[in-house]
Image (cartoon, grey):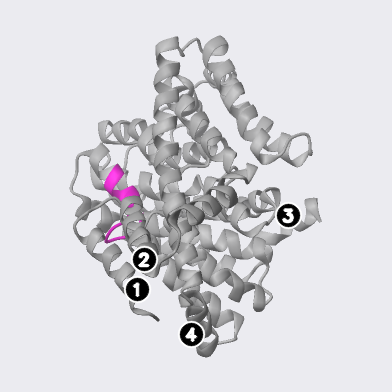
Amino acid sequence: MNTLIILAMVVIALSFLIRVPIGLSMFSASILYLLLDGKNIGIVSDVAMSQLFSNTTIVAIPLFIFTANIMNSGEVTERIFTFTKALVGNKKGALAYINIIVSLIFSGMTGSAMADAAGIGIMEINEMKKDGYDAPFSAALTSTTSTVGPIFPPSIPLVIYAMLTGTSTGKLFMGGMIPALMISLVLGVYVWYISKKRNYPRGVQFTRAEFIDYTLKALPALMTPIILLGGIYSGVVTPTEAGALAAVYTIFISIFAYKCLSFKGFVRVVRETVIQTGKIMVIAMSAWVLSFIVTSSGLAREIADLFISLTTNRIIFLLIVNVLFLFLGMLFDTQVLQFVFLPLVIPIAVALNIDMIHFGVVIVVNMMIGLSSPPYGMLCFVSSAIAKTPVQSVFKEAIPMVALMIVVLLLITYFPPLITAIPNMFMG
């Protein structure tokens, strides 16, 4: 490893310690390296722009972000929430079950963990606190259920993985279905246990007429994932086109079905989408340049040689990758992990004949668990701010939930058909 790459890593580490935004940290380190190494920054930037942004798959990212913002801007999420309350009924711990189900439904529309936690999570946490649930538990459950969003289709991290590896986005989306349902199921089992232990309140029993009424009111919103995924798997639209279709459809139902989207609200949604997309693209661009440096400096080859020297056994390799990405997922944004660290392990996974659909879903599940894990899980910080409760208490409540999610991670890691069965069945 040469001195310049060490210097670049030191700059990133120091920037991280003094809380410089990660995108700016990587840009600073990359520019310093390129200048000292005598490389032409203009040529590197041109290559980065042409390779990163010429891929049409990346267009799906702002479209799914836009869809999430539209859903959070009006009554759409409220209709879904009320429908789920009627669906769950008077079970003990009803609002905790609702939290899980709403996140699963919402994930079929947006593909973003942050959109779930910061959007519908506000409603979930406030309702749970009002009903007598502990604030730390409400926040911890919201942070862990939000991880389902990028696992169940559509998924922004899976779109990025498909772009980086050339893997089928449709197959990746299908591969995420069973793991997402498994995580929802184990969290549901934990809710059943903890609701009995703490005597959490029962929900409200709705009449059949009320249930039908709330279902009909929620139906336009509930049709979003059906239209989106149906379009992809029928071959009518590509995943990128499906993102555009979902965006147009959510605008339509917000204006005409729910009459909750004003022109001012639409402008605000566009502005928020531009800001959020800009943040992701800055990270993506800076991470691509850093990845280029890591590869051109020979560090990537040294890391690959290190992995191979440790093991050529697929089982052990997957265990190492799981531990590594789980740890890194607690510290870094998912875009950083995908653009910087993922390219280092993909060639090794290919060399070991690991299925790329299987590997992609395992990586994304891993990163999502990291987002809600102590000591730096970003989703826990978001939900603790919403719940107005110390993040340490949220982490304490999240530990058993994260442990159950790790069990699911191990199952899908070492039993690939849990991921590959559906894609192989429907897409060959």
Magenta residues (range): 372-382
Q: Quadrant of the N terminus?
A: bottom left
Residue tagged 4: 306
Of the two numbered discs 1 and 3 in the rendering, the one whose residue sits closer to the viewer: 1
Q: Residue at x 51, y 82 (%)?
A: 307
- Name the residue located 19 percent from the left edge and 57 percent from the top edge: 18
Q: Amino acid at mark 4?
A: Leu
Q: Residue at x 43, y 27 (%)?
A: 72
Considering the image in quadrants, where does the C terminus appear? bottom right
Nearest to N terminus: mark 1 or mark 3:
1
The mark total stands at: 4
Q: Callout 3: helix, strand or loop? A: helix
Residue 353 spot, x, y in % from top left = 69, 75
Lateral position of residue 155 relative to residue 387, left or right:
right
> Taking the image as drawn, is residue 137 in sight?
yes
300 sits to left or right of 95: right
* Horizontal arrangement in the rendering, residue 232 relative to residue 141 (left or right): right
Residue 186 position within the rendered picture, expressed as x and y whole percent measured from the top left: 48, 56
- Kindly identify which residue carries mark 1: 4
Task: Tell me the CA gap for discs 1 and 3.
Answer: 44 Å
For marks 1 and 2, the one nearer the N-term is 1
Binning the other alpha carbons within 10 Å of mark 4 as few (below 14), some (14 to 19) or many (20 upward) gives few
Neighbour tally class for label 2: few under 14, some 14-19, many 20 plus, Cα within 10 Å: many
Precedes in sequence: disc 2 or disc 3: 2
Classify 300 as above or below 12. Answer: below
Marks 2 and 3, how far apart at CA = 42 Å
- Residue placed under numbered mark 3 in the picture: 423
Q: Nearer the viewer, mark 4 or mark 2?
A: 2
Q: Nearer the viewer, residue 411 or 90?
A: 411
- Disc 1 + disc 2, Cβ < 8 Å: yes
What percent of the width, then of the height, locates residue 94? 41, 37
Q: Are marks 1 and 4 in contact (CB under 8 Å)?
A: no
